[in-house]
Structure formats: structure tokens, C-alpha cells
Amino acid sequence: MRPLRSIDSERLREDRDLFERFRDPDRPIDREILVERFLPLARSLAARYVRRGEPYDDVFQVACIGLVQAIDRYDPARGIAFSSYAVPTIAGEIKRYYRDKTWTIHVPRDLRELVLTVDRAVTELERDLGRTPSVDDIAARVGATDEDVLEALHAGHARRPASLDAPASADPDSPPASRESIGMDEAGFERVEQRAALDHLTAILTPRERRVIVLRFEHELTQAEIAQHVGVSQMQVSRILSRILGDLRNHLAAPGAG
């Protein structure tokens, strides 16, 4: 049986040769060959980092994206084994995937990265300065402009929405929860709109048709009772109601109605 060290050395030589050919325009190989060769590495890292409730296939797909990125960026001339280079690249892509999922509002990736950098800088500056750092302090630490730092600080609040039921503060005399200060739906406005639409529609009816509608839907009389009031048969009342409702529906559905 061949020793493992010999097998590993041979594997490294094969990897190096494949990457040299991948970079050599005179004897190129397809990227798919390298992807297939190192797919077990992506599969292993996906299994290591998958979280409870997260589909493995989604994490594995992200790991494959990281693998392709590592293949495209890897330089065999540096003398580093590809696996040593690829592991942090793939793991970083998976961690970035989880980090991006914690944002509830879409924010560009470069801004998300700056938010994380600013967060780390604030923690370090608070420890070093013994006080809350100013925007100028943060900007100098991260090498960004004051405007970029302010944008990152504001964007940091977009990670998770505040509950509308959360109290404004721990003070019992503080203002009520956020939802108490937000306007509520007022059903009366909808009824006003419905009444306006109804008035417009009933304008197309004859006086007798409007009387039938009022007796049926406002006074809630039966068709027989309506027939006595109007002086027609119950069958005629039924036909009148059917025709009126059909005309109203057609008028309401017509383009530009109302």
C-alpha cells in the first residue's frame, strides 16, 4: 500500500498541472474539470456550515459559487495548495450568504460590507478611546468619508425592523408603542366612497327602478311586499331587480366608470 504522503504529493502535482493548463492558452482545460475535481470540498464545507432550518441544497449552491471564485482567483505560482486557498474563500461566501439573509431591507453589498466594517470600528474605538467615537473618529479608522460613515450607520438600522408593539422606552411614562401613534384604517372613508359610487350608479336608473332598489336593499322588503308597493307582480319585481343589478355591474365594470 502506498503511503498517504506519497498519494498527497501526487495529488498536489496533479492539481498544480491542471491549474497551469487552466491558465495556459496553448493547452487549456475547461473550468468544469476543476469544479468536478474539487466538488467534494464544497460539499464538505456546505455540510459543515449548514444551519438548522436552512436547506442544504441552498448552502451547497453557495459553496459551489465560492468554489468557482476560488478556481478563477487561484495562482499556482504562489506555491500554496489549492484547498488551503479555497477553504476560506468558500467559507467566506457561505458566511456572507447567512449575513445577507439577516437584512430585511435590500441594501447594496458594498454598503453592507461598510456597515460591518463600521460596526467593528465602533467597538474597537469605544474600547480604545473610552467613549463613544465621533463620525470623524470612525471615518479615520475605516478610511472612508464622513458621508459614507453616516450612510453606513443609518443602513445598519435596516437589518431588522422594530416591532410596532415594542414600547418607545423602558420609562413607564414614555409615549405609547409605535403602532399607537400610527393612523388606523377608518372604515367610514370606505363607506363614503361606496355611497358616492352608488349615487353615481343609481343616477342611470328610472324613478321606479330606484324605488325598487330602495325598498329591497334599504328597507329590506321581500319581493312580494315590493310588488304591493309598486303595483306590479312579484315576477316583474324579480325581473326588474335582475335587470337593474346586471346593468349596474356592467356599468361599474366599464372602462372609466365611476
Image: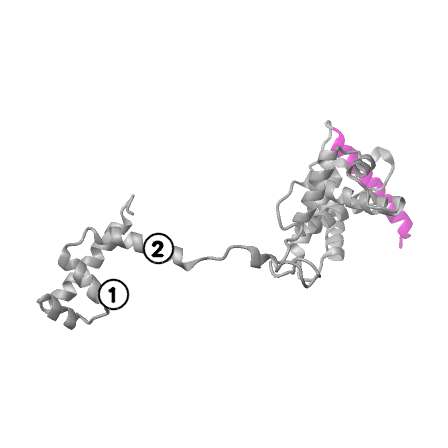
Q: Is 11 contained in the magenta span?
A: yes
Left or right, residue 74 beside residue 229? right
Residue beneath the point at 17% across and 63% down: 212
Magenta segment, principal secondary structure?
A: helix
Q: Specify the quadrant of the image occupied by residue 56.
A: bottom right
Q: Which residues are magenta?
A: 1-24
* Residue on which the image places disc 2: 192
For the residues labelled 2 and 1, the Cα–Cα distance comes to 16 Å
Q: Counting residues from the N terminus, which is met first, the one under dot 2 or under dot 1? A: 2
Percent across and percent down for residue 33 are 71, 41
Q: Which residue is mark 1?
A: 218
Circle 1 sits in a helix, a strand or a loop, which is it?
helix
| Residue 253 in sight in this render | yes
Identify which amino acid the numbered label 1 is placed on: Glu
Image coordinates of residue 151 in percent, x first then y, are: 69, 39
Residue 251 placed where, x, y %?
24, 50
Disc 2 residue type (three-letter):
Val
Does residue 68 appear in this view? no
Residue in front for this viewpoint, 209 or 99 = 209
Seen at 82% across and 34% down, the residue is 140
